[in-house]
Image (tube, helix red, strand yellow):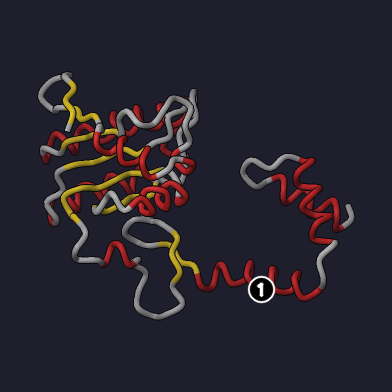
Amino acid sequence: MDSIHSLIQYFTELPGVGPRQAKRFVYFLLSRNARYLDEMCRLIQDLKNTIKTCTECFRFFPNDTRDGLICNICKNINRDKASLMIVCRDVDFETIEKSHLYNGKYFILGGTVPVLEKVPEKKIRLNELLSTVERRAETEGLREIIFAMSVNPEGENTLDFLKQSLTPVTQKYSITMSALGRGLSTGTELEYSDSDTIKNALKNRVSERKSDDSIIKT
């Protein structure tokens, strides 16, 4: 296989990129000069050297210093330690953070749970999440977990699985679980939502009481 078709194959592995679009990418790159391609290659190589994974929330963050592997948000003493927002991907975190409407901590799942998935715990950071919730409940007074999922089948399935998995620890520490409410229409990907939509979804988030199956709004 020549370099054109090999690169096309690599591009098709990117989320949302099909063979036709991948081919366009390759021929676009062929039309660029050597300086453009060299700079692009350098930036790709630098990803592993300058971008780290936060050991607290598991999001990617730029860290070209030697001051540890905890991101600026997790280190920020002014963030609300009583709330933890769970998002599926880094792009979802960026969407929420860009809205400037949430001041708590985050946890990045690293993916979603597909419908009919037989081993859902392998698709997300479930063990890390359970450990984080218990630790923060004991040491930081965690009181609310907010699920920020896309309103589509995979997002809903992920939400149901997380609620079921977290119920024992939330009952143990009297932690409220809530999900983004009206403001996000069915089929919406969280990363494409604007600030007003996020604001309404946060304002109208739905919580579940631990004592019964009734639903309350916070």
Please state the horizontal and vertical placement of residue 15, each as a whole percent of the image. Answer: 61, 43
Q: Measured along the vertical axis of the image, is residue 31 above or below residue 94?
A: below
Task: Please tell me which residue is depicted at 84% across the width and 61% down the height of the picture.
Answer: 30
* Total number of numbered discs in the rendering: 1
Of residues 83 and 98, the one drawn nearer to the viewer in this rendering: 98
| Residue sticking out furthest to the right | 2
Mark 1, other Cα within 10 Å: few <14 / some 14–19 / many ≥20: few
- In the picture as drawn, the residue positioned furthest to the front comes out as 196
- Residue 166, image x and y in percent? 25, 36
Taking depth in this image into account, of 9 and 181 the one nearest to the observer is 181
Look at the numbered disc 1 and give the secondary structure of its residue.
helix
User: What residue occupies the far bottom of the structure in this picture?
Assistant: 66
**In percent of the image, x 14 and y 28: which residue is there?**
210
Q: Position of residue 9 (x, y in %)?
A: 77, 48
Reply above or below: 137 against 30.
above
Specify the quadrant of the image occupied by residue 180. top left
What is the quadrant of the C terminus in the image?
A: top left
Name the amino acid, label 1: Arg
Kindly identify the residue that appears in the image at 42 percent across and 29 percent down. Answer: 151
Which residue appears at 19% of the width and 38% of the height? 169
Position of residue 148 measured from the top left corner of the image (x, y, whole percent): 35, 39
Query: In the rendered view, would you say 189 is above or below 213?
Result: below
Circle 1 residue: 42
